[in-house]
Image: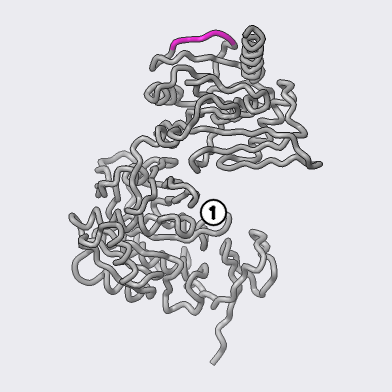
Amino acid sequence: MAKRASVYVCQSCGATAPKWVGRCESCGAWNSLVEEAAPESAPKGLGRAGGKGRRLDLVGLAGKSAPPPRRATGIGEFDRVCGGGLVPGSALLVGGDPGIGKSTLLLQATAALAGSVPCVYVSGEEAVDQIRLRALRLGLAGAPVQLAAATSVRDIVATLDAGETPGVVVIDSIQTMYVDSLESAPGTVSQVRASAQELIRLAKRRGFCVLLVGHVTKDGQIAGPRVLEHMVDTVLYFEGDRGHQFRILRAVKNRFGATDEIGVFEMSDGGLAEVANPSSLFLSDREGEVSGACVFAGMEGSRPMLVEIQALVAPSALGTPRRAVVGWDGGRLAMVMAVLEARCGLVLAGNDVYLNVAGGLRVTEPAADLAVAAALASAATGVPVPRGTVVFGEIGLSGEVRAVAQGDKRLKEAAKLGFDRAVMPGRRSAGGKAVSGGLAAREIAHLADLVALFDTEGGQRRAAGHGS
């Protein structure tokens, strides 16, 4: 009997090679090629010269389509990120670091739904007794959730396809599942792709929602083939620092709702508790007027959120000063520092610079540029940002301050939390202006105007000190 051919598949990007090499030629990953059985060749004769296929019925764009039904879990932050609830027949992929709370969140969601629709929780990592212990700790032991510990996709499909159709199925995790028709080990590219395909096909056919838990690599990406994120309808990332009690559920893809929505949770002994007003929670430990601290009025999806950005500028004893960033892009920090030095004359070279977004939140939007610049200018001059002030705006390389979207929402959120002043983009470089929510806005057109504010504040403080 002829030996079946094999290929080497990259576990990072899914590229194939006829023989083993140390470095993948597609993605550049080292030692990522694993030997797997070669897939059978595709059937020949398709197309014009082959057999006839079934003719498709083509329809136009215009037509009556009802909005997809929703199954709300009752966990407001989870439903917000999903677009209003779970859609029957959809597939969701939830990724996150180990121990961040993915299994806890999904167990709470299924327990909340189990009273109205049948829910099944299948774990390939834990025994049934371990899941029961977690449910007991979370106070969910009485929820009618059906449990199973299995890794064979064939057994799982046979169980779900027989009897009553469940409403929600959780697979924890997809990297532990295997299809017995493949010779590769669980967790490889071919096994993850084949297992997900079988489960998603069953969910579409039977009309239940399947939630797949995915492991992440050390760089924060979901492990396995990238095609896995294209196969599902929604991709959610569960983020957070285990040193903080806050957890962020972020949607990066959603065919049934908005992307970039976030849900904020607080980890406690009783599980994950949703945070209805994240801004007040992120600012709860904020002290009075401290140099190097600035409140940024940002947007996360459709939700305005206020966070504190902290900066520290200290003399460096090293030949190459250190730059440390937590919660923001290090490349963008270098750009803002370069603009401050080249366009505004604020010398930061020769100093160690540390930047931190308080609360463990990661900020990605360019509107944080002006708040970062204000925190750096405050730390360098020793002049605190005036109390009750929020800052937002994008900075260009020439030093101009550019407008950002949804400014009214940012200002209304700030006014609701007791702030009375805002530094924001505008066509004027001086003067205050009353805006919606009762805030007095300082509109600046160039970054030099922001630095001048700290020079003015510093001069007034020095004059007051000499006068006393």
Q: In which quarter of the image is residue 140?
A: bottom left
What kind of secondary structure does the magenta stretch mostly adopt?
Answer: strand
In the rendered structure, which amino acid carries the disc numbered 1? Gly
Image spot of residue 402 (x, y percent) = 58, 22
Task: Tell me if residue 302 can be seen.
Answer: no
Image spot of residue 94 (x, y percent) = 41, 55
Which element is circle 1 on? loop
Residue 432 part of the magenta-drawn span: yes
Residue 395's place in the image compared with 426, above or below, is below
Residue 107 part of the magenta-drawn span: no
Which residue appears at 33% of the width and 38% of the height?
Answer: 276
Q: In this view, does 159 lie to the left or right of 230?
A: left
Residue at far bottom of view: 1
Which residue appears at 56% of the width and 13% of the height?
Answer: 427
Range covered by the magenta-colored residues? 430-434
The residue indicated by pointer 1 is: 220
Q: Nearer the viewer, residue 254 or 376?
A: 376
The colour scheme used to paint the residues is one colour
Residue at far front of view: 468
